[in-house]
Amino acid sequence: MSTVETVASADASPASGGPHGYSKDKDSHLKRLRRIEGQIRGLQRMVEEDVYCIDILTQVSASTKALQSFALQLLEEHLRHCVAHAAEEGGPEIDAKVEEATAAIARLLRT
């Protein structure tokens, strides 16, 4: 199997560990998640220091929005990469990818 075939095969399977839609921006995603992690640690510190509840709730809201924003970016990359790849390949894989994306959107809307 050639390198191109190996990469294409890895793209088709979510469990393969191959390149994903977010791979090209992995460093910026990790940086963003570390910032969010810092916000969460800040929440813990606020509770430990008995900060006023409304101030903590304000920080909870900011942390929640940061995670939602990250999730939407990741979803967009999934649609552009994984779903688009499945559409190019054709066959039943596109239906599975669309169902998978729809379920992810439904989970995001429930939060």
Image: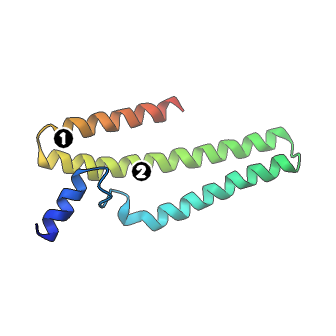
Secondary structure of the residue carrying tag 1 is: helix
Q: Position of residue 70 (x, y in %)?
A: 50, 50
Q: Is residue 88 left or right of residue 26?
A: left
CA gap, disc 1 and disc 2: 20 Å
97 shown above or below 84? above
Three-letter code for the amino acid on which mark 1 is drawn: Glu
97 shown above or below 48? above
Q: Which numbered dot is residue 93?
A: 1
Q: Position of residue 20 (x, y in %)?
A: 32, 57
Taking the spot 18% from the left edge, 59% from the top edge, the residue there is 8
Secondary structure of the residue carrying tag 2 is: helix
Q: Nearer the viewer, residue 8 or 27?
A: 8
Q: Is residue 13 left or right of residue 33?
A: left
Quick check: marks 1 and 2 in contact, CB under 8 Å? no
Q: Which numbered dot is residue 74?
A: 2
Quadrant where the N terminus sits is bottom left
Q: Position of residue 27 (x, y in %)?
A: 46, 67
